[in-house]
Image (cartoon, rainbow, N blue to C red):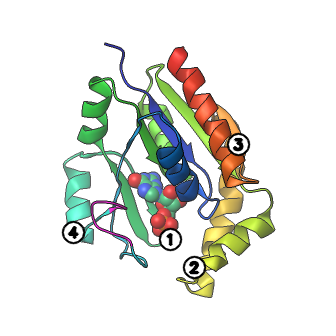
Amino acid sequence: MKKGLLIILSGPSGVGKGTIRKYIFENSKLNLFYSISMTTRSPRNAEQDGVDYYFVSKEEFDERIKQGKFLEWAEFVGNKYGTPKDIVEDLRNKGKDVLLEIEVNGATQVMKKVTDDRVISIFLMPPSLKALENRIRKRQSETDSVIKERLEKGKKEMTLQTEYDYVVVNKSVVEASEEIIKLIKLKRKS
Ligand code: 5GP
């Protein structure tokens, strides 16, 4: 059996990775599996444990790092986020395609670590820096200094876009999502 694809969807915080991921899961018939990340961040708005993230304590997260249970993990604006390794591996070994929606540092780790040819990496770009700032502000859940920190980080992350297989500009959710769906279909055939 062919190993399942590992689809890395990355890009700066606030670029719309989550919205695009939801569109792909709701509107494509790709039957992908989403890797639910673990985080030490507190739930935001209506986020649910085991659906949006596995919300864990800092101690539990650090214990899992020690045990080597993450495919990758990264610290992002004061919190840790990581991809559970076993779940992703099991699914791929069963031929299932798994999508990771992760920040840039983690994506770089995965691209270095997973060297088989069933990996596709996509960097999502905002149409402009102003658009990125507006999106981050719209969440209204963070202080001004966190917003600034996310934006500064985003600017640096954008310089790494050339490391990815594809760069997609998020001018419209539908267009960007449909473009990504096409790229995944193409990779499936290879
Ligand atoms: P947020 O706090 O906005 O949910 O997430 C902050 C950033 O962490 C986003 O860019 C999000 O894509 C990223 N992220 C979510 N899960 C993971 C993960 O498992 N690993 C890494 N490296 N980043 C993640």
Is residue 89 or residue 180 the one in the foreground? 180
Examine the image and state in which quarter residue 55 appears.
Answer: bottom left
- Reading the image, the residue beneath label 4 is 59
Alpha-carbon distance for marks 4 and 1? Answer: 18 Å
Residue 160 in view (yes/no): no
Among the two numbered marks 4 and 3 on one chain, the one whose residue lies closer to the N terminus: 4
Q: Residues within 10 Å of mark 3 (few under 14, many from 20)?
A: some
Tell whether position 118 is magenta: no
Q: Is mark 1 within 8 Å of ligand 1?
A: yes
**Residue 10 in picture, x, y percent from top left:** 56, 48
Badge number at residue 77: 1
Q: Is residue 121 above or below residue 127?
A: above
Amino acid found under the numbered disc labelled 3: Val
**Residue 22 in picture, x, y percent from top left:** 50, 53
Residue segment shown in magenta: 47-53
Q: What residue is drawn where x is 62% and y is 30%?
A: 183
Alpha-carbon distance for marks 3 and 1? Answer: 24 Å
Examine the image and state in which quarter residue 177 appears.
Answer: top right
Is residue 170 or residue 83 the one in the foreground? 170
Q: Secondary structure at mark 4?
A: helix
Q: Is mark 3 within 8 Å of ligand 1?
A: no
Q: Secondary structure at mark 3?
A: strand
Q: Is residue 50 above or below residue 118?
A: below
- Reading the image, the residue beneath label 2 is 146
Among the two numbered marks 2 and 1 on one chain, the one whose residue lies closer to the N terminus: 1
Q: Main secondary structure of the magenta part?
A: loop
